[in-house]
Image (spheres, helix red, strand yellow):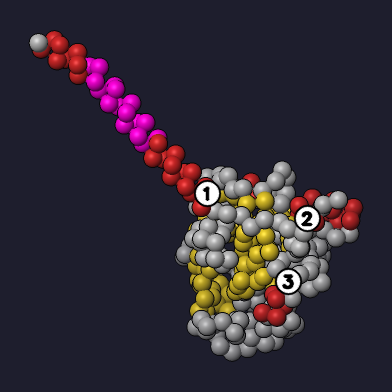
Amino acid sequence: MSFHKNNQVKYWKPALMLIAVFQLCSTACKKNEADAGAYQPRPVTAASSKFISKIFDYMPAPGQFINEGLGSPEAAEALVGKAREGLVSLGGYGGYLVFGFDHSIENVEGADIGIYGNPLTGVNMEWSEPAIVLVMQDLNGNGLPDDGQWFELAGSEYHKTETIKNYRITYHNPKNTTDDIRWTDNQGKEGYVLRNNFHRKAYYPLWIKAQDQVSFTGTLLKNTLSDGSIITNKPFAWGYADNGSEDFKTLMESTGAAYNSFDISWAVDGQGNKLQLTHIDFVKVYTAQNSNGNPYEPDISNPRARFLGEVSAEIGGAVDLSLHLKK
């Protein structure tokens, strides 16, 4: 009897385990199917535009162009419906622009999104102001970028040891037009966005509600400044906006109208895990270097320390490459 009972236990346990695994798998599969079915991409129609259709948010960090032509909400809105007809400055590190199209952007083979900037690419004259790009899906279908996590399109520097994830910077408003703009960060450092003689008005964005201080969080890329007869800021290999990379230069030589290309397949989550996104609906672009354009840091007494001003990405529009390259 004891032997029979033990044999029953011996054979029942695997069977029970199989049933449990089957039930868990069925539940998980149903959940995944439900999740997949919940998101409904907006289709491309005959009336769809390849250009930005809406600016959802423009929040620049302090910078020399802020509160004037390039650094105003009007400049951001002017990107709607066209490209290469104007620029908007994102200010220093973290300053961002959020936009969308009148349809979902499909993740097809190769690059999916083109973003225009104005990097300089001449030999020993390079001046890139790289910006990181993030994407989001409209999971709740309300047409707004309020669906939770942004997913970074991991460029060439994402996995490098010099790259700092979860970087946070806070800018403190001096509330005058004479003092440099002080910043502090979560790395225990502080510094200033240096004023220069070319731009003598307020550098802190005057129209935002947070007039005492404003903070930004993201991925921080290393500085690429180099001193010489001309101060340069070298580009990264690929994966950033306003970046004079080799593919940007090749496109400029062949068409005269270059953009930086982005593949939705580069998307990663907050832990760096690759994602499989079939479509995206919203795009966020932010300045990715915290740099004064001063290769002599921390020395600010050099006559050229304030000559160029902060590294601040400029954006000149964006296109859905599937429509842009359609024959």
290 left or right, relative to 25: right
SS under mark 3 = loop
Q: Residue furthest front?
A: 46
Q: Amino acid at mark 3?
A: Val
Q: Position of residue 301 (x, y in %)?
A: 66, 76
Q: Is residue 24 magenta?
A: yes
Task: Mark yes or no: residue 299 visible.
Answer: no
Q: Main secondary structure of the magenta part?
A: helix
Label 3: how many Cα within 10 Å (few below 14, some 14–19, many 20+): some
Question: Depth check: 57 or 128 in front?
Answer: 57
Say which residue label 3 marks: 80
176 left or right, relative to 314: left
Find the distance from the CA under tag 2 to the CA under tag 1.
26 Å
Q: Nearer the viewer, mark 2 or mark 1?
A: 1
If you read the primary sequence from the N terminus, does the residue marked by circle 2 or circle 1 appear first? 1
Q: Position of residue 246 (x, y in %)?
A: 79, 50
Q: Quadrant of residue 305?
A: bottom right
Find the distance from the CA under tag 1 to the CA under tag 3.
31 Å
Say which residue label 2 marks: 323
Label 1: how many Cα within 10 Å (few below 14, some 14–19, many 20+): few
Q: Residue at 82% of width from left, 52% of height from top? A: 326
SS under mark 1 = helix
Q: Residue furthest left?
A: 1
Q: Amino acid at mark 2?
A: Leu
Q: Residue at 64% of width from left, 86% of height from top? A: 202
SS under mark 2 = helix
Considering only vertical position in the picture, is 186 above or below 250?
A: below
Say which residue label 1 marks: 37
